[in-house]
Image (tube, rainbow, N blue to C red):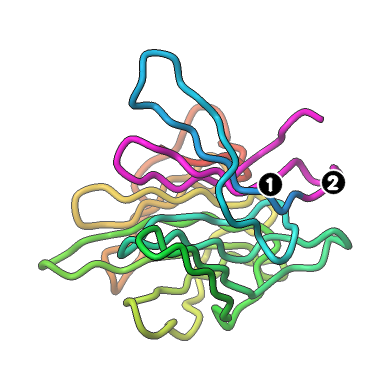
């Protein structure tokens, strides 16, 4: 079947898209590896699958581990689960981000030689942000972003950037700043790169 909006995590020159599809389409539990180190890119299955099929999940590579966070299950219920895949040992794990996201996007921000994994997602009718320092998930951070517009995340320099509809916001670890407006609204279900 055709693939819909998929989260992606980049590791060096390979991309691991967790099996997400468009809302209303079957969720996926697969992870596929897109190898881009050859002239013709190749797609192959990753050794481990997600324990919960989901759509619209966030994915990011952080500390040699792929994190798949939130999204919606096959009954369209938001998920708070975090599935991890260690790229060195191959071990898989499950934990909780503490907040259920029906749609989420993730990015890793490095500031002052310290990296954090940020996940912005739709929780209820609003957009919420959580951060992971490698050990602990933060308490949810409220935003003024519109949950009906979904959200995309990207890291640039030492800030997190969130795209919400036609609005671009930055987050420096303490405050949100409206940066700009886009001519065309972004579909938050698509990764921002």
| 2 or 1: tag closer to the N-terminus | 1
State the CA–CA distance, disc 2 to disc 1.
9 Å
Q: Is residue 193 above or below residue 27?
A: above
| Range covered by the magenta-colored residues | 1-27
Q: Which mark is residue 20?
A: 1
Mark 2 crowd level (few <14, some 14–19, many ≥20, 10 Å Cα):
some
- Which residue is outermost to the top? 39
Residue at point 70% right, 54% down?
A: 148
Secondary structure at numbered mark 2: loop
Q: Indicate yes or no whether the magenta region holds residue 24.
A: yes
Expressed as whole percent of the image width and height from the top left, the position of residue 134 reads 33, 77
Expressed as whole percent of the image width and height from the top left, the position of residue 92 reads 53, 69
User: Which one is nearer the viewer's eye here, 186 or 4?
Assistant: 4
The image quarter containing residue 133 is bottom left
Q: Is residue 164 above or below residue 97?
A: above
Discs 2, 1 touching: Cβ within 8 Å: no
Residue at point 56% right, 36% down?
A: 186
User: Which one is nearer the viewer's eye here, 7 or 32?
Assistant: 32
Secondary structure at numbered mark 1: loop
Q: Is residue 39 above or below residue 130?
A: above
Q: Which mark is residue 26?
A: 2
User: Which one is nearer the viewer's eye here, 167 or 10?
Assistant: 10
Q: Is residue 112 left or right of residue 86?
A: left
The image quarter containing residue 138 is bottom left
Q: Is residue 94 left or right of residue 157?
A: right
């Amino acid at each position: 079947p055709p693939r819909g909006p998929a989260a992606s995590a980049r590791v060096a020159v390979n991309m691991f898209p967790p099996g997400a599809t468009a809302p209303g389409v079957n969720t996926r539990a697969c992870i596929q590896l897109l190898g881009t180190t050859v002239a013709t890119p190749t797609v192959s299955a990753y050794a481990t699958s997600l324990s919960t099929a989901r759509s619209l999940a966030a994915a990011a590579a952080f500390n040699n581990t792929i994190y798949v966070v939130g999204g919606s299950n096959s009954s369209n219920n938001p998920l708070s689960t975090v599935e991890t895949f260690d790229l060195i040992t191959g071990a898989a794990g499950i934990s909780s981000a503490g907040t259920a996201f029906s749609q989420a996007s993730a990015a890793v921000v490095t500031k002052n030689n310290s990296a954090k994994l940020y996940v912005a997602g739709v929780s209820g009718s609003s957009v919420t942000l959580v951060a992971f320092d490698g050990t602990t998930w933060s308490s949810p951070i409220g935003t003024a972003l519109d949950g009906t517009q979904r959200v995309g995340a990207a890291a640039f320099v030492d800030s997190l950037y969130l795209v919400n509809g036609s609005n671009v916001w930055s987050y420096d670890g303490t405050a949100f700043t409206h940066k700009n407006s886009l001519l065309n609204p972004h579909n938050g279900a698509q990764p921002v790169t």
